[in-house]
Image (cartoon, helix red, strand yellow):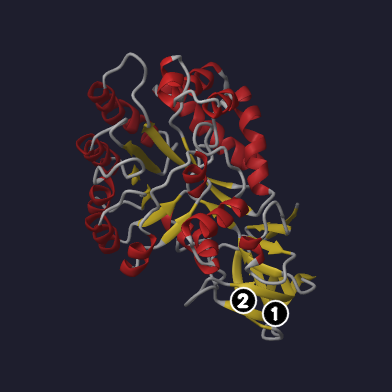
Amino acid sequence: MQCDTLWTNVHLITLCGDGLGILRDGELAAHEGRILHVGAAGSGAHLQPTLRIDGEGRWISPGLIDCHTHLVYAGNRANEFEQRLQGVSYADIARAGGGIVSTVRATRAADHQELARQSRPRLLAMRAEGITTLEVKSGYGLTLDDERKQLQVARALGEACNVHVVPTFLGAHAVPPGREAQEYIDEVCTVMIPAIAAEGLAEAVDIFCENIAFSTAQASQVFAAAQAHGLAIKIHAEQLSNQHGAELAARHGALSADHVEHLDAAGIAAMAEAGTVAVLLPGAFYFTRDTTLPPIAALRAAGVPLALATDCNPGTSPLTSPLLAMNMGATLFRLTVEECIAGFTRHAAQALGRGDRIGQLAVGMDCDLAIWDIDAPADLVYRIGFNPLHARVVRGQPDPV
């Protein structure tokens, strides 16, 4: 049987079945961008590869997936970080024109080329650590034209950098200056979502449901509009307080509820029943010096899938390292090695509605791989400031880094 590429002399982290699905002394074959064969050494003797690659004892995992980022934006808020270190409150910074308003102002002022120029290094940093699929949210434009611009730049960057970008419309990220929350949500639902959907610019719609942002009633309105236009739904929920947003989103069949530090038992039960993924964001927890841990044990007990992500954004998680996010997940949230790796592969794919295509090494899945110079899978979580990536493979095509 013909195939394009056969990797031999490798150890595989398949993420199939229970645990990490480790297969030592294995091999993997790809044909026409999909995985054709996964098995023990020598089990693919019937294959006739165009290219045979000796993995020299390296480990192969699915390509990493970052399922929650705000990667495309303009401006820099390092000065605000410095101010907070000196004791200035976030509220005072916001009143002085800082906070999200400063990022919105900078993003609106940047044209497509400038927005891409500023965002590209962040994407390349993630790519260099094995990311092959990346969600990118809008939310720093807060007008139709500027939200559209962010989503267009995200897609273009993905194509230029050979990373699969999954775009999410987050028009309901904050109330724009000078607007009323309900008036703005009405515009999001009646103008923005229909336009974004018609232009094919997003696969999902997200909303920040919090006492400083939008209510559950407004979230329900956004969900209805999104689903009426064929878009999946996600939610920023229970980050600062329990607004019961995750429970609401699960009832609407949400792909994920993200942050969830203040999630209660009712929310957990609703997520478990709906199959809604909990996306944990340790970078934001660390950067904001939060002290309320997500209810990890209760989520585990209920069987809620746990994904991890960087939450790359200028205000609360300027993080572009999935490997560091794994270590943070382990050290701050006490996740296991298995949970951290599954959080950036199998469960991250589920959070993007792509669990049938990526996130596992199985026959028929897209052949997106990360090839690592490591002794064991735990090295991906244990080391800090260490990048053992040897190569990426995207749709079966080797892509050395």
**Circle 1 residue:** 47
Comparing 148 with 275, the one in front is: 275
Q: Is residue 337 visible?
A: yes
**Residue 64, percent from left and from top:** 58, 57
Q: Is residue 102 above or below residue 14?
A: above
Q: Residue at x 64, y 73 (%)?
A: 12
**Circle 2 residue:** 37
Q: Is residue 344 visible?
A: no
Q: Residue at x 57, y 37 (%)?
A: 318
User: Tag 2: Cα neighbours inside 10 Å, few (<14), some, or many (≥20)?
Assistant: many
Contact between marks 2 and 1 (CB within 8 A): the answer is yes
User: Tag 1: Cα neighbours inside 10 Å, few (<14), some, or many (≥20)?
Assistant: some
Residue 300 placement, left or right of 69: left
Q: Which label was assigned to residue 222? A: none
**Residue 144, percent from left and from top:** 40, 24
**How far apart, in angstroms, are the residues tagged by discs 2 and 1?**
9 Å
Residue 63 placement, left or right of 213: right
Q: Name the quarter where the N terminus is drawn.
A: bottom right
Comparing 296 with 215, the one in front is: 296
**Residue 292, percent from left and from top:** 38, 48
